[in-house]
Image: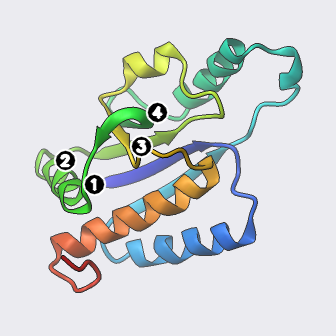
Amino acid sequence: MKITLLTVGKTEDAYLKDGIDKFLKRLKHYVKFELTELPELKNTKAMSQEQQKAKEAELLFKNITSTDHVILLDEGGIELSSVKFADMLNKKMVASIQNLVFIIGGPYGFDDSIYKRANDKLSLSRMTFSHQMVRLFFAEQVYRAFTILKGEPYHHQ
């Protein structure tokens, strides 16, 4: 299985980049993991929020296939403990899902067309975090999930 984290916009802060890189290197031992950062939209001041979401949706659709299993990282998604998240990833692997794509949208969330395409929605917290921070939190949680599945001592219960 390959896991892709698809994001709108780049990670700008060096400390976040360093943290993300740390977990991406660690994940190589467990799963093929790819971070794909799509460019932020330009000249958005003249666009409504709905227009921005529609343009972002166009970019996102160019980077997913009809066979991808798409999970939106969304405030309206289900909340899972780290152990339950590990269990979810394990079930996706057992189900022979080839490409699991998690998506972090732009500043206004997702266009309705993306919600319709998604297979699932997952919330990392009821709190709101910057989209850049979510990338780091998500990478760490995927790493944690694989250490849980392998019975390694990273996660303490």
Residues marked 3 and 2 touching at CB (< 8 Å): no
| CA separation in Å, label 3 and label 2 | 24 Å
Picture layout, residue 36 above or below residue 104: below
* The label number, if any, that marks residue 39 in the structure image: none
What's the residue type where badge 2 is placed?
A: Lys
Packing grade of label 2 (10 A; few <14, some 14-19, many >=20) is: some
| CA separation in Å, label 1 and label 2 | 8 Å
Whichever of callouts 3 and 2 sits on the residue coming sooner in the sequence is 2
Where on the picture, by quarter, is residue 84? Answer: bottom left
Q: Residue at x 25, y 49 (%)?
A: 80
Residues marked 1 and 3 touching at CB (< 8 Å): no
Where on the picture, by quarter, is residue 62? Answer: top right
Q: Residue at x 40, y 42 (%)?
A: 101
Depth order, front residue of 3/20: 20
Label 2 SS: helix
| Residue named by callout 1 | 1
Label 4 SS: loop
| CA separation in Å, label 3 and label 4 | 27 Å
Residue depth check, mark 3 versus mark 4: number of the one nearer the observer: 3
Residues marked 3 and 4 touching at CB (< 8 Å): no
| Residue named by callout 2 | 92
Picture layout, residue 127 above or below residue 85: above
Expressed as whole percent of the image width and height from the top left, the position of residue 50 reads 66, 13
| Residue named by callout 3 | 126
What's the residue type where badge 4 is placed?
A: Ile
Residues marked 1 and 2 touching at CB (< 8 Å): yes
| CA separation in Å, label 4 and label 2 | 17 Å
